Image (spheres, rainbow, N blue to C red):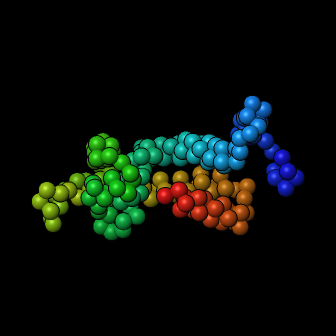
Amino acid sequence: MTEDRPQHRDPVDAIIDQWAAVRPDLDTKAMEVFGRIYRLSRTMGDRMEKAYQPYGVSRGEFDVLATLRRAGEPYTLSPRQLSATLMLTTGGMTGRLDKLEKAGLLRRSPDPHDRRGLQVTLTDKGLDIIDQAVGAGLAVQTQALASMDAEQADQLADLLRELLRESD
């Protein structure tokens, strides 16, 4: 490790060291970056699941409710729009919608502009749940960033944005 890099070692460092011992010819920089992104994603996913649990929704169900909420009033989208936004198959979306509708968090109704189509709309209960759950989730995410100052968090967000842009 160079002196300008943090001295705290993590499990990814151990993996990189193992590869260096058996395959010193490999450039493992990408593994260092993506290994940490993957581990962070899993850890934060678990934390987010726990944050949403008191509201009776999973991460996937939260995503549906949040997508409707972000759409603005009247908090209505078609199942196709939801599927495209969340990158889900129609079958996966149907399962989520069934559960959320049964819980009274959204309702499905005929699309007045398309006889074959449906609209999915947040109920008042769904709006209340998503507004509470998003606050709980943001608190967890903010806590995870507490070791960084605002400039570091902005820099990380910019770097990840660039990486995502180049990956598309």
In the displayed structure image, the side of residue 17 where residue 55 appears, left or right? left
The image position of residue 2, as x and y in percent, is 85, 51
Image quarter of residue 127: bottom left
Let me know if residue 19 appears in the view: yes
In the displayed structure image, the side of residue 67 where residue 3 appears, left or right? right
Let me know if residue 103 appears in the view: no
How many badges with numbers are in the image?
Answer: 0
Image quarter of residue 69: bottom left
Q: On screen, 127 above or below 73?
A: above
Q: Residue at x 43, y 43 (%)?
A: 58
Q: Residue at x 28, y 55 (%)?
A: 80
The image position of residue 126, as x and y in percent, is 35, 54
Q: Residue at x 62, y 47 (%)?
A: 34
Front in this rendered view, residue 166 or 23: 23
Front in this rendered view, residue 13 or 55: 13
* Residue at far left of view: 115
Image quarter of residue 139: bottom right
* Residue at far top of view: 22
* Residue at far right of view: 3
The image position of residue 110, as x and y in percent, is 16, 58
Q: Residue at x 84, y 46 (%)?
A: 1
Q: On screen, 18 above or below 161?
A: above
In the displayed structure image, the side of residue 127 where residue 109 appears, left or right? left
Front in this rendered view, residue 2 or 148: 2
The image position of residue 46, as x and y in percent, is 55, 41
